[in-house]
Image (cartoon, rainbow, N blue to C red):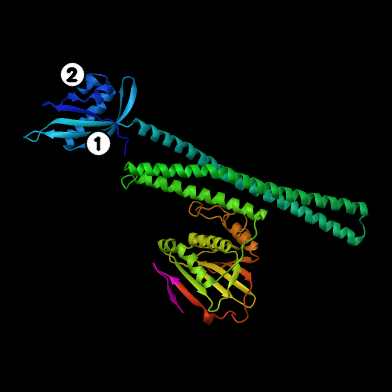
Amino acid sequence: MYDAIEASIFVVDVTEDGNFRYVAFNPAYEQWIGIRSEYLKGKTPEQVFSPTDAVVVRRHYTDCVYCGKTISYEECLRRQGSPSWWLTTLTPQQDSNGRIYRLIGTSTNINKQKQAEAELFQQLGIQIGMTIQHTQLDHQVHCQSADLESKQQIANERAIRKASSLRLMTRKGSAPRKSQARLHQVTQAQARELEKLNSLKNEFLNTLSHELRTPITSISLAAQTLEAVLKQEGIFSQEHPRITQLFAILHCELDREIKLINDLLTLAHLDAQTTPPIMDTINLKTWIPSIVGLFEERIRNSRQHVYILTTGELPLLTTDISDLERILIELLTNACKYTPAGEMIIVSAYGTANMIELSVSNSGVEIASAEQAQIFDAFYRIPNNDPWQHRGTGLGLALVQKLVKRLGASIQVESAAGQTTFTVKFPGGTEKNGDDCSSRERVVFLADTPTKSS
């Protein structure tokens, strides 16, 4: 565990009256303490160490005698003007009557390890402080984005009103050509301003995401390193549940921040349309269970039930598989998050004459009609009584909508009678498939392995 250097060995006699007197030291201990062995013989801890250190040393000696077995501990002692950290092991010696008459001690200097730990804790403290700052930035991003969206909406409404006025005046013949030209210029200027605002928003989010990625990665690495050190020290265990709980919170918040950054970058790339989709053909009947299987443990732990329903002759789908996977994962993540225990999650895929539909439904939860129009807006989160129960980035459904549009598909949400369904519709399908309920197959995940039933 510690770097091996020459150990300091010392022998302490336990007197009849319970006092401790030094007997001998090896050269390494003499060098550290700065006193020759012959001058230390017969001295008590109070005659060798400072009053503060002597109290600590005597307490450890007393603990060893009281326990009657070998003990190990870390201690910081000051000698020759500077503090020094030691890992000490005390072994008691008993006489024929069972009385402990002597202690044999071995001390190894661990200054380098303690210095490294101190630097690690300092770095972690700095990184946690940065995490708090980034959380505040997260809130600022939300506010800035909402402000930009509001400005865009106002600019849109103004442009629409101006265009409507221009068309009305043109139809009535009451607008001189100069007025028409001026209104056209105003409309064009507002359109350019709207485009500029949208560009600034995307640039702001993209830049912020890149700036946050490096420090968040450093925080994650520091947390993992500290956790490994604590596990080596035996501190990270069931005996210290508070530490385990704090690290669980830290990792959870880091994962949330990393997802926020990745979602922001993905949104920026989708808005910029930097790369076209890579189209491939897949069989949804075999592909869907592989994605649902990723959530099987989470669903089982939440005591939910998941079903996969498909038609008997579901046509092949040509799409970007990575985009489709992201869509289904986001929809399943939301379903798992909000579905109460004992309720159902259903993933369906059906083919009709000119359409292939992929839907994710969950029971036990409803989205109010007033909220349905806003759930695809970036950073929008449905209000609930406990805002800490279901925390997210507010970008998942916004990403889904953009990815669906990128694939040339459409998405809609229906929520009523205690059930919410998101349906993605892809152009395609064949006449013979229809929507025959009798040809549907069902896959039910209830335990470790799925079972099929027709």
Q: Residue at x 58, y 79 (%)?
A: 435
Q: Measured from the top left, where is residue 447 in percent x and y?
A: 39, 68
139 drawn magenta: no
Residue 157 horizontal/vertical position (percent): 75, 54
Residue 399 in view (yes/no) = yes
Residue, disc 1: 72
Q: Is residue 386 left or right of residue 61?
A: right
Quadrant where the N terminus lies? top left
In the drawing, what numbered circle is on residue 245? none
Q: Residues within 10 Å of mark 1 (few under 14, many from 20)?
A: some
Relative to the observer, which residue lies in front, 90 or 19? 90
Is residue 220 placed above or below 321 in the rendered structure?
above
Question: Where, by quadrant of the figure, is residue 382 drawn?
Answer: bottom right
Range drawn in magenta: 444-454
Q: Looking at numbered disc 1 in the image, what kind of residue is underneath it?
A: Ser
- Counting from the top left corner in percent of width and height, residue 243 is at 37, 44
Residue 336 lies left or right of residue 105; in this view the side is: right
Spatial CA distance of label 1 from label 2 is 27 Å
